[in-house]
Amino acid sequence: MTTPNEKPLQDLPQTPVILSGAKDPCLVSMDRTGSDLGNREAPHISNEAATHPEAKLDLRTLTPARVGLARTGSSLTTTDVLDLALAHAEARDAVHATLSLPTFPEEIERRGWLVGAVKSAAPDRTTYLRRPELGRQLSPASAEYLESWISLPNDPEIVIVIADGLSALAVDRHAIPLLDALQPLLPDWWAIPVIVAEQARVALGDPIGQILKARLSIVLIGERPGLSSPDSLGAYITWQPRPGRTDAERNCISNIRAQGLDYATAAERIAYLCREAARLQLSGTAIKDDPRLQLP
């Protein structure tokens, strides 16, 4: 039932309205307001950037993110659809991948580091993905192994934990090159234990550091894969590691990989945060990045 001044919804004009200056079909809207609802004018969108070549900026040259994708009709092109499917597959594969054992710890040991290997309380990858809390706990056998570890003449200042996390691919590709970059920046690096941890979350570094009585832990871990970065490595620095530490008590450096933060810069940032943590006797939000190490 309508009043004399009202129109049924189906009678309202449905003519496409092209936004002023816009030639892109995406800037087409359907005007269903009708003259009785205010006669609103379509907003004006400047097309100046499109008419001046010097004002154009191709964002695709600045980021691996999917921007400026081509279209075929109302859909993506076949090439972009296949590329997206490949990125999904690479991310899934990274999550389910495992470390290259035993060759990975052996390669670290050949570089002169003290190396050990532990496992979390998650017995397999499926359990690890479904039960995150188990990835933060040491298995009983691993805890016993660390407690009886006699390779250390004194309590270490630092312990480095290399954890598979959610991307063992990142660890396989980037952990050893990052260790190589860290060696000259860490005092007495040959006395620093490097613990390779399977099915591990970031917080697994806390019980490891506590058992070894380390003052500071550095956890190098595979980060959650993205659609443009299935192999991103993260570094977490924690002062006085022990179970119960929160994320606010850690410092994080992320996206360590060839297309992200390079090894030398990441190593400098890690060394700086370690020095600041030792100076302030804490870690986390109270420590700020060295402005000299900021990206341009």
Image: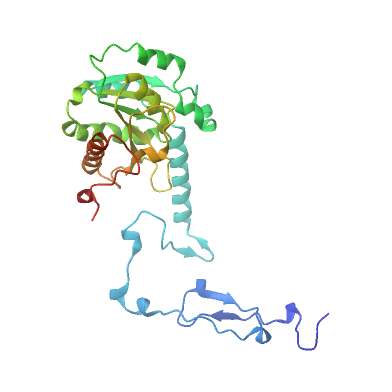
Residue 98 location, quadrant: top left
Residue at 28% in and 34% down? 281
Give the position of the C terminus as an image quadrant: bottom left
Q: Nearer the viewer, residue 68 or 238?
A: 238
Residue 35 location, quadrant: bottom right
Residue at 29% in and 36% down? 174
Q: How far across and how far down the image is residue 160, in percent? A: 30, 28
Q: How far across and how far down the image is residue 106, in percent? A: 28, 20
Q: How far across and how far down the image is residue 108, in percent? A: 26, 24
Residue at 34% in and 24% down? 209
Residue lying farthest front? 280
In the displayed structure, 144 sits above or below 56; it is: above
In the displayed structure, 147 sits above or below 284; it is: above
In the displayed structure, 265 sits above or below 200; it is: below
Residue at 21% in and 34% down? 182
The answer to whether residue 223 of the structure is visible from this angle is no
